């Protein structure tokens, strides 16, 4: 799981320090070396202006991007701050509408289409969805990102980053006050309030685990400032926790469901796909049936010759299919790490996947490091794992794959449910998706594209779809020795991506409740109870992100099929992978146009 820079969940490059980024100027970084026409030259200046001005209104995300001009500031989430962001979006949208796409290069036509969609999405989110009034995750995410993004990577000397952290700690109480002022408890869904109440203290884990242990790097005077800022933050977090527990959670009466009208509008912005909600559902239903049939065929191979197995006729009804697949999956579930062994198992899986991709020469590999780590506390509660990649201006910095540990308060039965779902083969599949050759590799390629604007506005379906495609590709290439049980586990994960798209509609449009959702996920999608419960939570906390996996994977499969058809016997898998990732992370419809020709728009 990952997100574009300006839509990354509280969790989607030579190194530019604060000095070099300022000296070069973001306009110089964003602009192409040669403008093909006067219109392209004007667009280059326009794009550079957006890349230069937008981060100032989201300082915490600017740090993630690698723009370190605002590292001491915190986002203004007040009404005035919203007006500033809205005014910027409207100003740039008016300028964007002045361009004639036919006068631009094809690359710039793509960037123009992406920016116009994003600007309209920003305006719609503020004025129609109005999530600032009901989603506390927006504010909590800023608070966590503000500190974590300063300490997670060595983009500048430690004392410089610590001084920025001091400044942000001093400014965070104002953010909490804005959160209390802007949120309308009666509109806040209970699940949102409860999740943020659990995450709130996670900011202090960054303070105590990353900031204070580094205090000795500062001169004595700055150490005194740090100590005072730390106390200010502790007091603010405690006050915020009291408000969350005593006011927001008890008063949270909002509906987490978007409803058909808002859902369809948001879906169009989020996916930039020609597919409607109904078309996605029809396609997903068809894919689910076909993938379960393939799982049945693999299960018959896995169970062949084993004593005590269920009957396995070639033609099966749904009940027989279910029993056979479940019996085969039990073999994978039995091979899982211990409760405290998930992160070490992920590290081993990452190493194995890297060795396999390199040995098979499947794609050009990054020259930057990646590491599996324990997910920071402030970001837990929505996903089991996500890829935390450096922004396009922080070149050469490490990518992290953040893994959520099993919560301490889970019972042994709950922990066992989680471990069965994320067994050793399942964790191998997870590391393919999040890192090798999934998100880590794809985003590294994306950040090599000269358009910083495109990196800012990366397509969720393209990014997530590539990671799902990579899982399937690795299994078909014979990863783990062509183990059929791994293929079965990978197909189960493919079913998860398909049912994600169905689930999103079930929850936000069809009104499905917990009982229906849990039955759908645990039976139809073969998910363990803990995975299904987590997905039920995730579906309520967000909308239109879950379909990105299925829609994106379907588009990637179609792109490769088209390339194979065109190239015939000359098709080369590594060349194809490098080519399809060379355009950054725009929606697949634009990648198709850039690769094979056709209209953009």
Image (cartoon, rainbow, N blue to C red):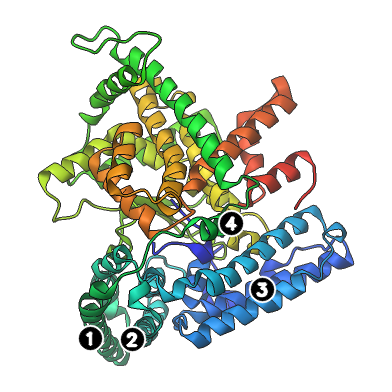
CA distance separating discs 3 and 2 = 29 Å
Decide if residue 196 is on the left or right side of residue 473: left
Residues at discs 2 and 1 in contact (Cβ within 8 Å): yes
Residues at discs 2 and 4 in contact (Cβ within 8 Å): no
Instruction: Give x and y (percent) for residue 412.
Output: 11, 44
Identify the mark nearer the N-term, 4 or 1.
1
Residues at discs 3 and 2 in contact (Cβ within 8 Å): no
601 is higher (above) or lower (below) than 293: below
Which residue appears at 50% of the width and 63% of the height?
7
Identify the mark nearer the N-term, 3 or 1.
3
Residue picked out by circle 2: 173
Estimate how packed mark 3 is, as few (under 14), some (14 to 19) or many (20 or more) residues with alpha carbons within 10 Å. some
Estimate how packed mark 1 is, as few (under 14), some (14 to 19) or many (20 or more) residues with alpha carbons within 10 Å. few
SS category of the residue bearing label 2: helix
Mark drawn on residue 235: 1
CA distance separating discs 2 and 4 = 32 Å
Residue extending farthest to the left is: 412
Decide if residue 350 is on the left or right side of residue 197: right
Instruction: Give x and y (percent) for residue 352.
Output: 37, 35
Residue picked out by circle 3: 50
Estimate how packed mark 2 is, as few (under 14), some (14 to 19) or many (20 or more) residues with alpha carbons within 10 Å. many
CA distance separating discs 4 and 1 = 38 Å
Residue picked out by circle 4: 458
Q: Closest to the observer: 525 or 448?
A: 525
CA distance separating discs 2 and 1 = 9 Å
Which residue appears at 47% of the width and 60% of the height?
397
Instruction: Give x and y (percent) for residue 418.
Output: 23, 42
């Amino acid at each position: 799981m990952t997100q574009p820079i300006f839509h990354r969940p509280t969790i989607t490059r030579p190194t530019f320090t604060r000095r070099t980024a300022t000296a070069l100027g973001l306009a110089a970084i964003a602009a192409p070396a040669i403008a093909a026409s006067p219109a392209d030259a004007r667009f280059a200046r326009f794009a550079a202006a957006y890349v230069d001005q937008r981060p100032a209104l989201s300082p915490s995300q600017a740090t993630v991007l690698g723009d370190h001009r605002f590292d001491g500031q915190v986002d203004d989430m007040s009404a005035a701050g919203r007006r500033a962001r809205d005014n910027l979006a409207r100003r740039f949208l008016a300028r964007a509408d002045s361009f004639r796409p036919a006068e631009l290069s094809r690359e710039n036509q793509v960037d123009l289409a992406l920016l116009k969609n994003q600007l309209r999405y920003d305006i719609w989110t503020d004025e129609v969805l109005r999530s600032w009034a009901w989603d506390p995750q927006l504010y909590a995410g800023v608070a966590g990102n503000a500190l974590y993004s300063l300490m997670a990577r060595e983009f500048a000397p430690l004392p410089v980053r610590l001084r920025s952290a001091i400044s942000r700690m001093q400014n965070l109480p104002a953010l909490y006050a804005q959160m209390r002022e802007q949120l309308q408890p009666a509109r806040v869904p209970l699940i949102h309030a409860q999740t943020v109440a659990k995450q709130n203290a996670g900011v202090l884990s960054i303070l105590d685990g990353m900031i204070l242990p580094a205090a000795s790097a500062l001169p004595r005077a700055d150490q005194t400032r740090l100590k005072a800022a730390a106390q200010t933050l502790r007091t603010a977090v405690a006050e915020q926790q009291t408000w969350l527990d005593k006011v927001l959670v008890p008063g949270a009466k909002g509906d987490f469901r978007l409803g058909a009208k808002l859902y369809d509008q948001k879906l169009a912005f989020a996916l930039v796909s020609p597919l409607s909600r109904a078309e996605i559902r029809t396609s997903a239903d068809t894919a689910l049936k076909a993938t379960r049939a393939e799982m049945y065929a693999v299960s018959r191979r896995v169970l062949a010759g084993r004593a005590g197995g269920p009957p396995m006729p070639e033609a099966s009804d749904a009940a027989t299919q279910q029993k056979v697949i479940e019996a085969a999956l039990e073999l994978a579930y039995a091979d899982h790490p211990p409760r405290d062994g998930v992160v070490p198992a992920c590290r081993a899986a990452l190493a194995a996947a890297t060795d396999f991709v390199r040995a098979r020469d499947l794609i050009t590999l990054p020259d930057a490091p990646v590491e599996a780590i324990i997910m920071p506390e402030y970001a837990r509660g929505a996903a089991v794992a996500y890829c935390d990649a450096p922004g396009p201006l922080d070149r050469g910095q490490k990518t992290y794959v953040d893994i959520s540990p099993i919560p301490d308060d889970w019972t042994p039965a709950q922990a066992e449910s989680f471990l069965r779902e994320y067994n050793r083969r399942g964790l191998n599949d997870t590391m393919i998706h999040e890192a090798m050759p999934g998100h880590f590799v794809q985003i590294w390629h994306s950040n090599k594209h000269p358009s910083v604007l495109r990196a800012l506005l990366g397509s969720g379906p393209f990014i997530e779809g590539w990671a799902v495609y990579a899982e399937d590709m690795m299994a078909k290439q014979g990863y783990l020795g062509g183990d059929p049980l791994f293929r079965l586990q990978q197909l189960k994960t493919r079913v998860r991506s398909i049912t994600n798209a169905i689930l999103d509609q079930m929850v936000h449009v069809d009104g499905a409740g917990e009982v229906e959702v849990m039955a759908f996920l645990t039976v139809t999608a073969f998910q363990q109870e803990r995975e299904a419960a987590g997905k039920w939570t995730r579906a309520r906390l967000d909308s239109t992100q879950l379909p990105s996996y299925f829609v994106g994977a379907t588009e990637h499969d179609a792109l490769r099929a088209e390339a194979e058809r065109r190239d015939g016997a000359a098709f080369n898998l590594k060349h194809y992978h490098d080519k399809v990732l060379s355009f950054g992370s725009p929606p697949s419809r634009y990648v198709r146009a850039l690769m094979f020709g056709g209209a953009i728009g």
